[in-house]
């Protein structure tokens, strides 16, 4: 233990982390930059903050205040001690609805303030797209804005008073009329009034530099306002009084279509006199699909408010009439508005990939110019991109003249970094020529501070340095930001990564087979750190359960990045820190769809576990549950299911078995079916064959051995829909798919030389060599099926997802894998595509439950929703993950997190279900979790429909 660490542990009551994991998690924010801190402290209160400053000041160690870590310019990274306010100093101290103010701590997430203010008809005006995870402290540090700034301004416009600690331990309460000003600040201002009155551009989004002009007497000598945007370089914020605004009772959204972004940009300023709440712009090259948008090549999202829906709509329609548009759309439905806004909010992540999949990076994320000059600026910006051979997709706050963009800089080679510098210098000159600010929202940080003399001139920047010295004479707080900055092309986070591709097992097709590129996908926007999911969202259940950054998708990606870098995490694939962070990853695959850049942590986890345990003994659970298909087939062949069930019911024996198998003691061992699904299939009395399409029903391990009732129900429904059902072959070779009828099915069904398997349990435990062998055997068995046009129906969503994604990505060298993946359909999809004229029985009951996480992330549930609606099953299923997640919830040590994940969405929805509701759970894990934690029997949709068909038959 170092002297610094020991001193901090003695001085503070909060957590002190100088371990590998704590440091690795805070090396980066959402920028291009990386700095390795000495340690991290999570202070419990202001006394802890003061103690940290005392200890660090005595030793000359820098201190960096950090909120959500979503800063774009590198200002939330540092080489000293990082203060993490999100763990403890994250409270809403109080709200005064009459005064329209709130008292907040710096670690409070913005959405929590909005939730608390909403019942009073109030809200905090600024709302960055990261509102679900950014903190008020970070917003004040960066003077953040968001989409509603045309109506409610920047964070500085909403700040009333700030309580801060200086680096030398003074506690100041900042406000107007010099309240809380440190000694010497007033004299500095009085000595340079002319410069302060003339040297700052007059535009709504001027965030660059220090806001010293707020200290002018005609501006109220507002010390609190001047502190906003100082990026933690002047003092450490410990509490803030912020103003709230009245939230409109109703809103409407006018989406205006234009031919191109320049047309949209030029139109934006003309809409401001109409008093809109937002004027946001984006072009077609940033939108994955234009479905739901009006015609055009670029759009303005103009929100209006009113006391009633009619009033809000009338204002939106007035905007449409005033705008010269190609096409327009007015939406008043809140759900429809949320869908459209999600396109805009995800842009910060979506923009990190070019349409061809190549990488794009921040660095010039938020320049701002006067709104009336935005069209001209965008044209000059595009010309500069072209001149440097670069590409970018601008979007942002057109009404305020602020543009966000990610650019496909090559930050991996010396030549590419040199071009990055040349472009940055030239673009700074373009911004200044248009009367703009280098930063219009996210701050200067390391990305732009070096270029501030081009905007302000050397003398004004020297004034910034003098102001910094007044507040922080020892240069202790976030040094290298805003004044005396590090060069913009140093400390790049990519420089430490391997230059050659790492030898890996999966194909990573979207990343050119490069694992480093896959890990680089995480840019730190931290959507995985949201504390609640919306709609059917899933990511990230383990973070919501623990609140620990190490258990977020971003945290795990950061640890993998540091593993590849080898500086902080030094033992590569053998790293216990990376292993422990991945241990609580449920492999729900939620990040594959919910993360704006489609980080796939489930695949990364499988890859890591493969290498980590290569040539070494694995945990018992990997053998007990990873090889589950083998053990279940053995039980079926020896007909010992009844004996095993009986033994499992004897508690002492079950306890021993669970301990030996690495299974959580709190779990009950699921009962094996007395008759397997395929056994029932062979002995059933076949129905008369229909004349519909042939479909091959996949007998997954769970349906086969643990819940054959699902398979039987699916056969009943598929045949009722007129489809001809067959099972896959069980003998390798050149088998022929017979006549495909339910009566004769496949000609070699009686053979018992092999069983198809998706390999899911081997993949999830990182046994990739075994998974590959199982998958190749499966492809051999499926060869005759692949010679037909028959779809493959998979009832278990996790198995379907494995066949769609893991199979072709692990066997990327076998073209049969992609062909089989393309054939895989869910139960609802096969009915919709191959029996379009069939109508399901009318169940006419409310439905509750949870969309399977793998279905949400990989398969999609649109067909399921339509099938449920057609059957009269009303209501929406929740998002999130059930928490059992295959082997995860059964593994020893995972029970508490597993149960917490279930309590996040699934169990509350079931408890609050209306009388007579059907509890839907297509996944075996989901049904098991419901049974074991809530005593509720969930059913596959096929079971519900089959039961209603039987009821109709009996009538």
Image (spheres, rainbow, N blue to C red):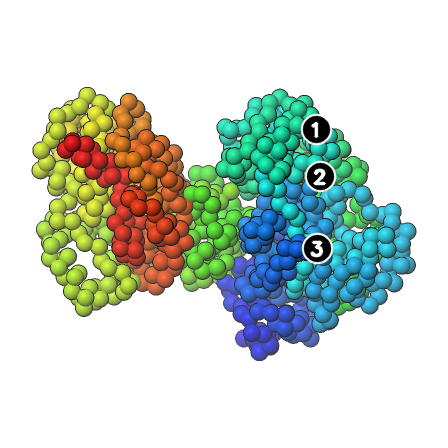
Circle 2 sits in a helix, a strand or a loop, which is it? helix
Q: Nearer the viewer, residue 230 or 387?
A: 230
Relative to 732, 417 lies left or right? right
Q: Nearer the viewer, residue 381 or 403?
A: 403
Measuring from the top left, give residue 20's x and y in whole percent: 51, 64
Between circles 1 and 3, the one closer to the viewer is 3
Measuring from the top left, give residue 528's x and y in whole percent: 49, 50
Measuring from the top left, give residue 862's x and y in whole percent: 38, 34
State whether residue 123 is above or below residue 290.
below
Measuring from the top left, give residue 559's x and y in whole percent: 49, 57
Residue at point 24% right, 36% down? 945
Circle 3 sits in a helix, a strand or a loop, which is it? strand
* Disc assigned to residue 267: 1
State whether residue 439 is above or below residue 873.
below
Relative to 784, 575 lies left or right? right
The residue singled out by tag 2 in the image is: 400
Question: Could you tell which of marks 2 and 3 lies nearer the N-terminus?
Answer: 3
Decide: few, some or many residues near mark 3? Use Cα within 10 Å; few <14, some 14-19, many ≥20. many
Could you tell me which quadrant the N terminus lies in? bottom right
Question: Could you tell which of marks 1 and 3 lies nearer the N-terminus?
Answer: 3
Residue at point 10% right, 36% down? 684
Relative to 520, 604 lies left or right? left
* Disc assigned to residue 159: 3
Query: In this view of the protein, can residue 567 be seen by the observer?
Result: no
């Amino acid at each position: 233990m170092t002297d610094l660490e020991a001193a901090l542990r003695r001085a503070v009551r909060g957590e002190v982390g100088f371990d590998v994991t704590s440091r690795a998690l805070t090396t980066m924010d959402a920028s291009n930059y990386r700095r390795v801190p000495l340690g991290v402290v999570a202070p419990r209160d202001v006394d802890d903050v003061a103690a940290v400053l005392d200890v660090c000041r005595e030793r000359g160690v820098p201190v960096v205040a950090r909120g959500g870590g979503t800063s774009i310019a590198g200002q939330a990274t540092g080489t000293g001690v990082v203060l993490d306010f999100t763990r403890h100093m994250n409270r809403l101290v109080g709200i005064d609805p009459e005064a329209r103010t709130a008292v907040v701590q710096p670690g409070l997430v913005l959405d929590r303030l909005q939730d608390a203010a909403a019942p009073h008809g109030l809200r905090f005006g600024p709302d960055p797209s990261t509102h679900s995870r950014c903190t008020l402290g970070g917003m004040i540090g960066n003077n953040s804005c968001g989409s509603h700034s045309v109506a409610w301004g920047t964070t500085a416009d909403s700040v009333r008073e700030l309580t801060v600690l200086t680096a030398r331990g003074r506690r100041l309460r900042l406000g107007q009329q010099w309240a809380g000003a440190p000694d010497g600040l007033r004299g500095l201002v009085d000595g340079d009034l002319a410069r302060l009155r003339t040297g700052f551009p007059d535009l709504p989004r001027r965030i660059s530099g220090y806001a010293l002009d707020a200290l002018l007497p005609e501006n109220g000598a507002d010390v609190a306002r001047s502190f906003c945007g100082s990026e933690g370089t002047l003092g450490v914020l410990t509490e803030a009084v912020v103003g709230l605004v009245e939230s409109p009772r109703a809103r409407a959204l006018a989406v205006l279509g234009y031919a191109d972004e320049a047309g949209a940009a030029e139109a934006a300023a003309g809409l401001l006199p109409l008093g809109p709440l937002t004027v946001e712009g984006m072009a077609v090259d940033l939108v994955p699909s234009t479905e739901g948008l009006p015609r055009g090549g670029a759009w303005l999202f103009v929100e209006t408010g009113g006391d009633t829906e009619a009033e809000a709509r009338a204002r939106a329609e007035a905007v449409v009439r005033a705008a010269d548009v190609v096409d327009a759309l007015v939406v008043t439905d809140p759900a429809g508005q949320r869908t459209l806004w999600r396109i805009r909010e995800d842009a910060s992540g979506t923009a990190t990939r070019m349409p061809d999949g190549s990488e794009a990076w921040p660095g010039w994320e938020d320049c701002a110019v006067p709104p009336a000059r935005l069209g001209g600026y965008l044209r000059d910006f595009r010309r500069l991109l072209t001149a440097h051979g670069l590409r970018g997709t601008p979007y942002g706050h057109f009404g305020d003249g602020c543009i966000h963009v990610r650019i496909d800089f090559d930050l991996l080679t010396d030549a590419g970094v040199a071009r990055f510098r040349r472009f940055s210098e030239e673009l700074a000159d373009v911004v200044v020529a248009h009367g703009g600010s280098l930063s219009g929202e996210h701050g200067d940080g390391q990305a732009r501070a070096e270029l501030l003399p081009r905007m302000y001139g050397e003398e004004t920047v020297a004034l910034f340095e003098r102001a910094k010295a007044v507040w922080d004479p020892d240069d202790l707080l976030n040094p290298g930001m805003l004044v005396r900055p590090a060069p913009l092309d140093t400390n790049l986070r990519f420089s430490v990564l391997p230059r050659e591709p790492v030898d890996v097992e999966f194909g990573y097709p979207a990343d050119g087979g490069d694992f480093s590129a896959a890990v680089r996908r995480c840019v730190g926007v931290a959507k995985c750190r949201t504390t609640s999911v919306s709609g059917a969202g899933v990511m990230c259940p383990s973070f919501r359960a623990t609140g620990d950054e190490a258990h977020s998708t971003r945290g795990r990606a950061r640890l993998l990045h540091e593993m590849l870098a080898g500086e902080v995490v030094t033992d590569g694939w053998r790293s216990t820190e990376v292993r422990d962070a991945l241990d609580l990853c449920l492999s729900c695959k939620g990040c594959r769809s919910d993360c704006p850049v489609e980080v796939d942590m489930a695949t990364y986890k499988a890859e890591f576990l493969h290498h980590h345990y290569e040539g070494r003994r694995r945990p018992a659970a990997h053998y007990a549950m990873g090889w589950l298909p083998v053990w279940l087939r053995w039980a079926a062949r020896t007909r010992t299911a009844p004996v095993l069930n009986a033994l499992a019911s004897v508690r002492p024996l079950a306890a021993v078995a669970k301990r030996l198998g690495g299974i959580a003691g709190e779990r009950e061992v699921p009962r094996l079916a007395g008759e397997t699904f395929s056994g029932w299939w062979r002995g059933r009395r076949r129905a008369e064959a229909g004349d519909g399409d042939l479909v091959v029903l996949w007998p997954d391990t769970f349906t086969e051995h643990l819940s054959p009732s699902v398979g039987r129900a699916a056969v009943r429904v598929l045949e009722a829909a007129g489809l001809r059902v067959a099972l896959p072959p069980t003998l390798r070779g050149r088998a022929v798919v017979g006549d495909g009828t339910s009566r004769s099915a496949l000609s070699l069904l009686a053979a018992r030389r092999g069983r198809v398997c998706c390999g899911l349990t081997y993949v999830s435990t990182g046994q990739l060599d075994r998974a590959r062998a199982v998958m190749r055997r499966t492809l051999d068995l499926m060869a005759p099926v692949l010679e037909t046009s028959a779809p493959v129906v998979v009832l278990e969503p996790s198995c379907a997802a494995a066949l769609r994604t893991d199979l072709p990505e692990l066997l990327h060298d076998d073209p049969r894998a992609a062909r089989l993946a393309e054939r895989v359909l869910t139960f609802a999809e096969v009915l919709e595509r191959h029996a379009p004229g069939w109508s399901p029985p009318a169940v006419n009951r409310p439905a509750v439950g949870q969309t399977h996480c793998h279905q949400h992330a990989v398969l999609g549930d649109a067909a399921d929703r339509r099938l449920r609606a057609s059957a009269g099953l009303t209501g929406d299923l929740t998002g999130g993950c059930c928490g059992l997640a295959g082997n995860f919830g059964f593994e020893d040590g995972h029970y508490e997190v597993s149960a917490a994940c279930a309590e996040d969405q699934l169990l509350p929805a079931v408890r609050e279900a209306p009388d007579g509701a059907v509890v839907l759970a297509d996944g075996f894990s989901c049904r098991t979790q419901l049974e074991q934690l809530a005593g509720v029997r969930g059913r596959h949709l096929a079971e519900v429909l089959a039961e209603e068909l039987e009821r109709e038959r009996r009538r």
